Image (tube, rainbow, N blue to C red):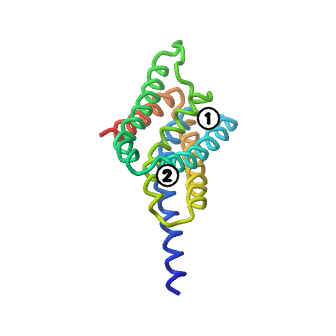
Amino acid sequence: MNEALERIGELLTILFMAIALGMDAFSLGIGVGVNGVRRRDVLRIVMTVSFFHILMPVLGILTGHYVGELLGYLTKFVSGGLLLLLGGHMIYSSLKSGANQFINYRSWPGIFLFSLSVSVDSFSVGVSLGMFHSELLLTVLTFGLFGGLMSLFGLALGRGVSRSLGDYGEAVGGSILFAFGLMFIF
């Protein structure tokens, strides 16, 4: 009976960790979705976020405790900096309608930056997972599933809100991403 309770506790811990890590993808998905994301782009974003939510903890596990502590401190600056860059560019391009786009979140590099920014905190979690006696494959696959689902829900919610915001959607979305970037850093 104790073993069954331990197993349930371990699964609940994995589930709560996956939801917590997926909240970034949800929140930032709203910011990107406000710009009116096409369905094909939603699928690419969700798949890429899922991939990074699997990859980053695995990299954290492989990297080890010492490097994890060193980079663990820097992850909030890297993640926040990427979000500031994406959000600032979205605000800039919404104000300058004829401006050249430097970052297009619908392009693969833009999707890559978005996915990396919402998944970089999974790296630090991955370092601690090496000491956590769980099934690592189940854990990282759960992280990937919830990261993708949470980004899908965020993109859908943002997309729905964008219809009521009209032309100001990109500025609002950029402001959300920018605010989250500041929150990550400070």
Q: Amino acid at mark 2?
A: Ile
**Which residue is identified by label 1?**
37
Q: Quadrant of residue 140?
A: bottom right
Residue 60 on image: x %, y %: 48, 48
Distance from the alpha carbon under mark 1 to that under mark 2 = 34 Å
User: Is disc 1 placed on a helix, strand or loop?
Assistant: loop
Q: Residue at x 50, y 29 (%)?
A: 170
Image mark for residue 153: none
Image mark for residue 61: 2
User: Is disc 2 placed on a helix, strand or loop?
Assistant: helix
Q: Does residue 32 sit above or below 91 in this rendering?
A: below
Q: Amino acid at mark 1?
A: Val
Residue 15 on image: x %, y %: 52, 63
Residue 142 on image: x %, y %: 58, 58
The tag earlier along the polypeptide, 1 or 2, is: 1
Q: Residue at x 60, y 47 (%)?
A: 50
The answer to whether 97 appears left or right of 42 in the picture is left
